[in-house]
Each structure stands twice: as structure tokens, then as C-alpha cells.
Image (tube, rainbow, N blue to C red):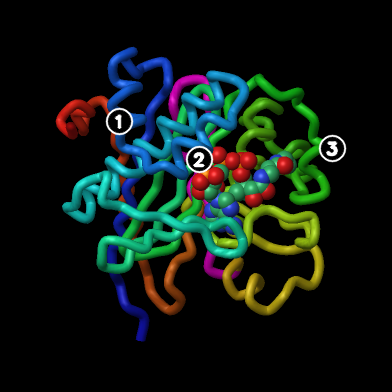
Amino acid sequence: MRVKRRCHIQIWRASPSDVEPAQWRDLTNLLDLTERSQAFKFRQAADRNAYVLAHGLRRLALAVMLDVAPTALVFTYDENGKPQLIAPKHPPIHFSHSHTRRGVVFAASADVPVGVDAESVGTEPLDFALLSPFVDCSASVLANKKHSPTTTFYRHWTALEAFFKAVGSGLSSAHPRLRFVPDPQGHWKVEFDAHQTPDITALASRAVVMPITSPIGCMASLAILEPLGEDITLVVHEKELSANVELNFYP
Ligand SMILES: CC(C)(COP(=O)(O)OP(=O)(O)OC[C@H]1O[C@@H](n2cnc3c(N)ncnc32)[C@H](O)[C@@H]1OP(=O)(O)O)[C@@H](O)C(=O)NCCC(=O)NCCS
């Protein structure tokens, strides 16, 4: 019997250009020593700011969702670089974030694994050859008259990275090429060109990828791994940092 249920996903987004000068100090104060030292490894201020905003946003959003102080959250990374929340004790939660100079995005769900990716549009050359080892977008480029090459490029790029973040492996040239196939809801399903490991094939068969509202100047995608054997309704709550959280609320 198939079970019908709702899967709730929260998406938070913010742009470095919206952060007031005094709020940078508040955001930096939320980060732990590891995050701060990582931030200061970025040579360009724009990259450093994006990192600080993404990590601050992740703490603020998870603090709201788990009802804890943002500075109480302790993270580590698994062997593939996937972030893990190890303290305080909390109910299971899946989360993912992305930082790019023009905007940052955070996604979280208690229901389904999620991956999110954002890219600043127009800062990289539109080079489909960059994507071709990872994703086959030839059919979409030729068939899709609705979207510009720029939209097609960034949609595939962010969908690709969001998918591999949801899976948890990160992007690697060792993966066979994948392609995105639209489903009746307008989301993308994931298929591989060649044989993939049974684990990733199983995860891909459950994946759904979709564009999400992104900070101005960016494009972003969300990937989820839906539970097998269930009819789900996705409920995506989108939030702006400034509208939802007073940064200076946290001393
Ligand atoms: C994670 C990945 C897919 C994308 O990273 P990115 O686009 O460079 O950077 P983003 O800001 O979007 O994401 C970085 C975050 O992903 C998360 N991440 C890293 N590895 C991850 C993994 N295996 N699973 C899930 N999330 C992961 C981390 O939280 C990281 O943030 P942090 O380092 O600040 O903690 C990375 O594996 C990668 O391969 N990067 C190279 C991208 C590339 O060369 N693209 C060009 C071809 S399309």
C-alpha cells in the first residue's frame, strides 16, 4: 500500500549585499573557531563574506528549527566532506548549504535528505564543456526553446551539485555521467548514462531536483531523496534571512 504524506523542506537564503556593516560582526560571532579560521583562509573578501554568511545562516536556521542557541551547534564533516551536526542532541535533520559571492542558500528537512546548490550567474564563462564530463545537457540545449543557454547552463550545474550533495558523495569525475529527465510535475528525475554503483543507482531512483528562488544574481537548485513507496507532497517554505531572524537578537 502506498502511503501519502507531506515532506516539509525549509529553504533560507540571503545575499551578502543585504548585510549591514554591523551585522558582519554579529554573524562572525556566531561561528566557532574552526569556521572563523576557515573564513580567514579566503583571500578575497567577497568569498570570505559568502562563507561567513552561509555558516551564520546555517546556525540561525537550525537554531530556529531545533530550538537551541546558534552557538550551541557543533558540526563536523564526514569522510566525503558532508557536514554533520554532532551536538547538541537533536532529532534527525537533513541539511545542506551553498555559498557563492552573490548569495547563499540553506535547506533543511526532518523528512527527507536534501542537497542545495547556488551559483552566481555570469561570473564564469558559459562553457558547456565544463559540465559535459558530469552531466549530459545536449538534449535540453537543443530541445528547450523556453530557456536561454545561460538558464540551461546554470540549471544543470546547480542541479548536478545539489544532487551529489543530497547523496552525500560530493562531485567526482569517477561518477558516470548523469542526465536529468523532466517528470510530469516539472521536476527533474536523475538517470545515469552508464553503470553506477548499486548504492548511487538506488539513491538516484529516488531523487527529485528542482529550481528554487535564489538570491538576486544567482541560480539555485534543490535536490531531495524522496522515501520509496510513498506518495509525497513537497511543502517548500522559503525564507529570507532579514525577514525572519534579527541577527542582533543573539549577543
Ligand atoms: C560539494 C561540491 C559538489 C560543491 O561545492 P561548491 O559548489 O564548490 O561549493 P558550495 O558552496 O556550493 O558547497 C560547499 C558546501 O557543500 C557541502 N559539502 C561538501 N562536500 C559535501 C558532500 N560530500 N555532501 C554534501 N555536502 C557537501 C559543505 O557544507 C560545503 O560547505 P563548507 O565547506 O562551507 O562547509 C563539491 O563536492 C565539489 O565537487 N566542488 C567542485 C565543483 C566543480 O568543480 N564544479 C565544476 C563542474 S560542474
Q: Position of residue 109 (x, y in %)?
A: 34, 57
Whether disc 3's CB lies below 8 Å from ligand 1 is answered: no
Q: Amino acid at mark 2?
A: Ser
Decide: few, some or many residues near mark 1? Use Cα within 10 Å; few <14, some 14-19, many ≥20. Answer: some
Side (left or right) of 154 relative to 35: right
Q: Which residues are magenta?
A: 205-222
Mark 2 lies on a secondary structure that is strand
Decide if residue 186 is in sight here. Answer: no
- Disc 1 target residue: 240
Decide if residue 149 is in sight here. Answer: yes
Q: Residue at x 43, y 72 (%)?
A: 227
Whether disc 2's CB lies below 8 Å from ligand 1 is answered: yes
Main SS class of the magenta portion in the image: strand
Q: Which mark is residue 129?
A: 3
- Disc 2 target residue: 98
Residue furthest to the top in view is 21
Q: Position of residue 127 (x, y in %)?
A: 80, 30
